[in-house]
Image (cartoon, helix red, strand yellow):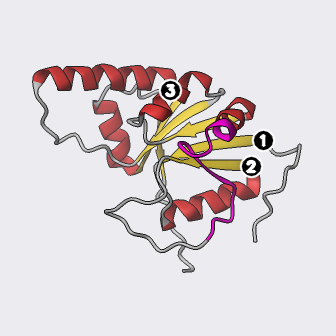
Amino acid sequence: MIDVSPDATRPRLVWLAVARSPYNDFLFQQLAQRYRLTVVFQQRAVATHPWQLGGASYPVLHVREDRRAVWQAVRAADATVMSGWNDPAYLALMPLLRRPRAFWTDTPDTRWRRGAPRELARRALVRAVFAHFDELWSTGRPGRETLEAMGSSPDKTRELPFFLDLER
């Protein structure tokens, strides 16, 4: 089991995510070795991805069930990463996020067609979210290119590798 005990020499990292998944579990297990990691999830499960996962080997909170603990973790963090920005609870937490702040997403789907008013509102929200973060991360080159096409500054945009446990 990974040591996630409090250790004053390791920075506190809070990662706000959508839901647990096998590939994110591997990433979080690795991060928990270097940081005092707390992962906050929007949902316990996603109907389209019914993963069968055991207990997490890192501290987990749920944004709607553990509000006070989430707020305290975010306020105490040395750094924060957010994915799933379209959740109102996460948007409400954005002003509290500690620097450095990063936003992470897989390749955004830009093929959705919306009516003009909804598309304009979405673009304004995306610009505001992008402006709030110090760095914007996406998985792979297609993700980085899509973020830049959506208005992310190339200076702030980072391309992350795919996280897979090749030993599983």
Amino acid type assigned to the residue bearing label 2 in the image: Tyr
Q: Secondary structure at mark 3?
A: helix
- Answer yes or no: is residue 37 visible: yes
Q: Residues within 10 Å of mark 1 (few under 14, many from 20)?
A: some
- Is residue 165 placed above or below 161 in the rendered structure? below
Magenta range is 55-70
Amino acid type assigned to the residue bearing label 3 in the image: Ala
- Residue for point 22% across, 40% down: 110
Tag 1–tag 2 contact (CB < 8 Å): yes
Query: Between disc 1 and disc 2, whose residue precedes?
Result: 1
Left or right, 49 with respect to 122, comes to: right
Q: List the residue tagged with mark 1.
A: 11
Q: Nearer the viewer, residue 57 or 92?
A: 92
Q: CA distance from mark 1 to mark 2?
A: 5 Å
Query: Between disc 3 and disc 1, whose residue precedes?
Result: 1
- Is residue 151 placed above or below 157 in the rendered structure? above
Quadrant (top left, top right, bottom left, bottom right) of the C terminus: bottom right
- Residue for point 70% across, 38% down: 73
Q: List the residue tagged with mark 2.
A: 35
Q: Is residue 118 magenta?
A: no
Q: Secondary structure at mark 1?
A: loop
Residue 61 location (% of width, % of height): 62, 49
